[in-house]
Amino acid sequence: MVYLSCLSSLALALTHLGWWGELRGAVESGIDLAEKNGNQPWRGLFAAMLGWLHMQAFDFAGARSIAEGLLETHAEVPAGQVRTMAMLTSAYADLATGQPGNALQLFLEVRDRQPIPKFFLQWYWRMIAEFGLVGAYLDLDELEHASAAAEQFLADALTTEDPALRAPAWDAMARVALRKDDLPRALECLEQAFASIQNHDLPSVAWRLHESAARLHLQMRDFAKTAHHSAEAASSLSRAAASFGGNDPLRRSLLKAAETLKIAADR
């Protein structure tokens, strides 16, 4: 139990650090050990983390497949940790593939889950849902709801010292400000986001900030900074891809996403 618990904590750390090849190894080791011991709860937890990894690495079909299997076998109400992670994986996959309405319902279900009984890191996954809500509301052109969701996420994130939560919260505020055409406020929020990770090497967070900065500077018609931030976003994804073996399909998925950002930089 102690060893499996350590693997679970290691997986979350590796997620933020962008060491996703190492993360895959840790998660697959956890799944293998749980299966050998007939421990289905722990197997489900590591499978949920594997699905989350596929989503982060832009393999949305693979992520959705893993999440759907877990949702069938973990149907408890209120949702526990595995079901919550699977719902979030499906929600972010839906959001990335143009289905914000579906994503919104899942994000709301996670955010509005009754507070008890609790599960490990329930507060953390609730905040991940809050971040997703901002994107879903923006894609649905519900700007006021997006603004309220971003404010709530920032308020919650600032109660922690976690840069991997603080930076996305400021990024969410910047994205809302950009949609409102409040460019000075968007720039201010992005400066806060970058400051949150100034002393931390978090490529899985940094690439999103640089992508948002590229969009902002494009709207400001500062094409040099647009190209710079697009290139930095691509570089962060390439670093995450480098942690995988050469034949890993997730490596190819990440490199394809990085190439898309490089093309944007060249334009």
Image (spheres, rainbow, N blue to C red):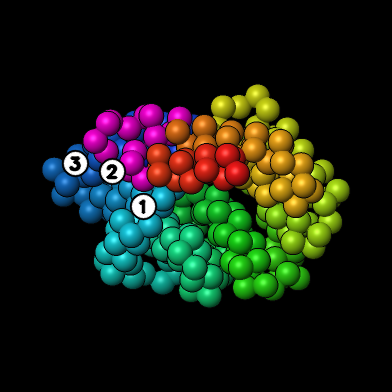
Q: Nearer the viewer, residue 162 or 194?
A: 194
Q: Position of residue 17 (x, y in %)?
A: 49, 32
Residue under numbered circle 3: 32
Left or right: 33 as drawn, with respect to 258: left
Callout in the foreground (1, 3): 1
2 and 3 marks in contact (CB < 8 Å): no
Q: Helix, strand, or loop for circle 3?
A: helix
The residues tagged by marks 2 and 3 sit, at their Cα atoms, a distance apart of 20 Å
Q: Amino acid at mark 2?
A: Pro
Q: Position of residue 86 (x, y in %)?
A: 39, 60
In the image, is residue 43 part of the stretch drawn in magenta? no
Residue under numbered circle 1: 59
Left or right: 212 as drawn, with respect to 111: right
Residue 53: tell me if it is visible.
Answer: no
- Count residues near mark 3 (Cα–Cα under 10 Å), then give few for <14, some for 14-19, many for 20+: some
Q: Amino acid at mark 3?
A: Asp
Q: Amino acid at mark 1?
A: Asp
Range of the magenta residues?
239-253
Locate the N terminus and report the quarter of the image it occupies.
top left
Number of disc labels: 3
Q: Nearer the viewer, residue 164 or 261?
A: 261
Callout in the foreground (2, 3): 2
The quadrant holding residue 146 is bottom right
Q: Helix, strand, or loop for circle 2?
A: helix
- Count residues near mark 1 (Cα–Cα under 10 Å), then give few for <14, some for 14-19, many for 20+: many
By secondary structure, the bulk of the magenta-drawn segment is best described as helix
Question: Where 200 falls versus 188 (above or below)?
Answer: above
